[in-house]
Amino acid sequence: MAKQVNLEVSIAKENLDNIGSIDSLRDQYGKTYQLIKRESKSVGVLYHGSMALKLYHMIRKTEPMPKNLVDGLDDFLIKEIDNGQIHTEQGMGFAILSQGFLSVNLWGRGNVLFTQTYTVEANYPELSREPLEKTGVACTWEAKIMNHEYELWHKYLMSSMQSEDKLKYLQNFIAGDL
C-alpha cells in the first residue's frame, strides 16, 4: 500500500516569497481568483445510446448556477455525443457542470480518464469547447469529485466488471461540501 512520505526541504525565505503566490490569470467571467467554497450535487445519470454519463453540479456557495446551463445540460451533452464530439468507446464517464464551466470525463484505454472542457468565455452565455491548455483540467474542488470517480473506477476495474459492478459505479456519487 502506498504511503505518504514527508521530506525535509530547506529553502531560503526570500525564495519562498517568490513562489506559490496566486497569479492574475482570469476565469471564464474575466475575474481573478477568490476563495469561494463549493458543494457537489448529484444530478443523476444521462443514458444516451451506448453511453452513461454520471452528472454532477458543482455549486458555488455564494451564487446560483446559470439557469440556461442547468436546464440545457442534457440536451447539450446529447448534441455533443451525436455530433461525435464526445467519444463513447468505453461508454462510461461523468460530467461536472459548474459556474460557466463543464468538464466531460470519459474512461478509455481501460484505466485512463480523458477530459474535455467547455466554458462560456468565448460564446457567453453558451458553452463552447476549449482546449485544456486554456482552461486547465480542473480546479481543486472539481478534483475532489474526480478523485472520488477515480477511486470508484479503480474498484470497478478490480471487480468482475459484470452488470452489478457497473451499476455500483453508476449509483455512487459524492455529494455535499467539498
Image (cartoon, helix red, strand yellow):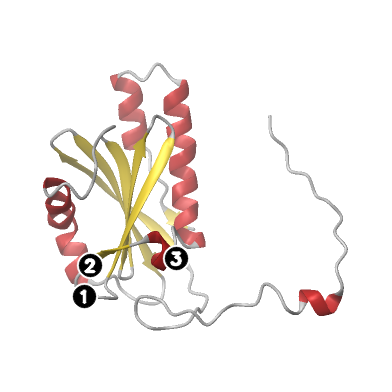
Q: Is residue 65 left or right of residue 143?
A: left
Where residue 169 sits: x, y (%)? 36, 33
In the rendered image, the quadrant that contains the N terminus is top right
Dividing the picture into quarters, in which one does residue 170 lie? top left
Mark 1 vs mark 2, CA separation in Å: 7 Å
**CB within 8 Å, label 1 to label 2:** yes
Q: How many marks?
A: 3
Q: Is residue 74 left or right of residue 66?
A: left
Where residue 20 sits: x, y (%)? 67, 72
Q: Estimate how packed mark 3 is, as few (under 14), some (14 to 19) or many (20 or more) residues with alpha carbons within 10 Å.
A: some
Mark 2 vs mark 3, CA separation in Å: 21 Å
Vertical placement of 19 versus 159: above or below?
below
- What numbered label is drawn on residue 38? 3
* Residue carrying label 2: 127
The kind of residue tagged 2 is Leu
**CB within 8 Å, label 2 to label 3:** no
The kind of residue tagged 1 is Asn
* Residue carrying label 1: 123
Where residue 31 sits: x, y (%)? 42, 83
Residue sitting at x 29%, y 70%: 65
Mark 3 vs mark 1, CA separation in Å: 25 Å
Vertical placement of 125 versus 105: above or below?
below
Name which of mark 2 and mark 3 comes first in the sequence. 3
The kind of residue tagged 3 is Arg
**CB within 8 Å, label 3 to label 1:** no
Where residue 84 sits: x, y (%)? 16, 46
Q: Secondary structure at mark 2?
A: loop
Depth order, front residue of 112/41: 112
